[in-house]
Amino acid sequence: MERTGCVVVGGGPAGMMLGLLLARAGVEVTVLEKHGDFLRDFRGDTVHASTIRLIDELGLGDAFRKLPQSRLNAAAIPLPGGRMLTLGDFASLKPPYNYIAMMPQWDFLNFLAGESAREPTFTLLMEHEATSLMSDGGRVTGVRYRTRHGSEGAILADLVVATDGRHSVLRRAAGLQSKEFPVPFDTWWFKLPRHASEKGAVAGIVPAFKDREAMIALFRDDYYQMGYLGPKGTDSRIRSEGVERFRQRVAALRPDLADRVDSIRSLDDLHMLDVRLDRLRRWYVDGLLCIGDAAHAMSPAGGVGINLAIQDAVAAAGRLAPALLRGQVTMQDLAAVERRRRMPTVVVQTVQRIMHRAVFVPLFAGRRSGVPSVVLFLARHFPAVTRLMPRLIAFGPRPEHAPGFARRGQPRATR
């Protein structure tokens, strides 16, 4: 039977970052990813300033900046009459961390995978899907997995870390209970072509609001990634209305893109995201730790889920690497990671819940279109809020720094 120091289940941003950091400490780490590659549409694309700073601390900044990307210099929301209200002007932040990088998540994950592969103690197993936990005497001791070809196997480990997302198999297998929060909307992702005349270095997340519905557009090289936001639980109604009605919805929200809605060939082109907002009451059991969406599913409101998950990974690596090198990860070690990351999670989720109540609940109830008056009031009469917003969006609460052992030229973690 295979054995490793730490097995990380899920090759998303949190899992790949944790694998890289632990490997730089000299920990034997194996990452299991159930897919054969990272090329999956409709994933988050924002790499916030806190993550860019982390990448610089790891000595990878030059290579990262050579990846295809564009810069988001401000966060804005639309006002009646077509004007935009800037909530966060990142130019007010100290360079070089005065922007958010926009890049396809698969490019970012391939970048992390390539850098991790340079570390002799790192192993990435693609097309390996974790199916269950192994335990001995009440402690988690490893995972069982299945490959794409149907073969099965198991890996023993001193620690299992679940980074397998909001539908985590491992957190369910461990019996960990979550606290659920109401969410007023779901999101339907799809693509629209981007004409040659529209291409360039422009980056942005363009929102559009209308009575009882909304839409966002993210820029790709040759297409727009579109997200239609509608009231929760209406997927069956939207599909029963047919593709032509959905094209009409898109054209009404974005008249400038009405000339290409026929590219939505059928409703099979829609990828429905069941938006959830929850967090585990406890993130761990003996031998298992959950981080990222496996510990706290985030709403897409604000686009901060990826970066919060990466910060979880950094905190986990800093605390757990020495314990893993000793081969003795205690419940106290796992509890310490949760304590450090629970506050930022609660803060971000509280902001998202406020956004849900202030923006989306009234919007989908037909009581208000566009930005609620409270947002305008705060922006106009409390300028300190608008001065603080860029840093909150770009760095979030309690941003983490790379542990010393993971930085180029620094000593490894001590046992």
Image (tube, rainbow, N blue to C red):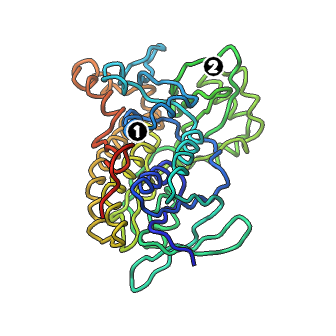
What separation in Å lies between label 2 and label 1 (alpha carbons)? 35 Å
Who is closer to the viewer here, 109 or 163? 109
Of callouts 2 and 1, the N-terminal one? 1
Q: Residue at 32% of width from left, 66% of height from top?
A: 323
Amino acid, disc 2:
Pro
- Residue behind mark 2: 255
Secondary structure at badge 1 equals: helix
240 in relation to 123, above or below: above
Q: Is residue 84 visible?
A: yes
**Image-quadrant location for residue 326:** bottom left
Q: Secondary structure at mark 2?
A: helix
Q: Residue 384 in the image: x percent, y percent?
A: 21, 23
- Structural crowding at the residue carrying mark 1, measured as other residues with C-alpha within 10 Å and reported as few (<14), some (14–19) or many (≥20): many
> Residue 225 or 85: which is nearer the viewer?
225
Q: Residues within 10 Å of mark 2 (few under 14, many from 20)?
A: few
Task: Determine contact: label 2, label 1, CB under 8 Å.
Answer: no
Judged left or right of residue 223, residue 358 is: left
- Name the quadrant containing residue 322: bottom left
Residue 53 x %, y %: 37, 35
Please name the residue that numbered disc 1 is placed on: 51
**Residue lying furthest bottom in this view?**
137
> Residue 289 at what x, y percent from top left?
39, 65
Is 278 drawn above or below residue 302 in the view shown? Answer: below
Q: Nearer the viewer, mark 2 or mark 1?
A: 1
**Residue 144, position as x, y percentages in the image:** 57, 74
Is residue 361 shown to the viewer in this render? no
Q: Residue at x 42, y 72 (%)?
A: 158
Question: Please, what is the three-letter code of the amino acid marked with disc 1?
Answer: Thr
Image vertical order of residue 73 relative to residue 289, above or below: above
In the figure, 377 relative to 263: above or below?
A: above
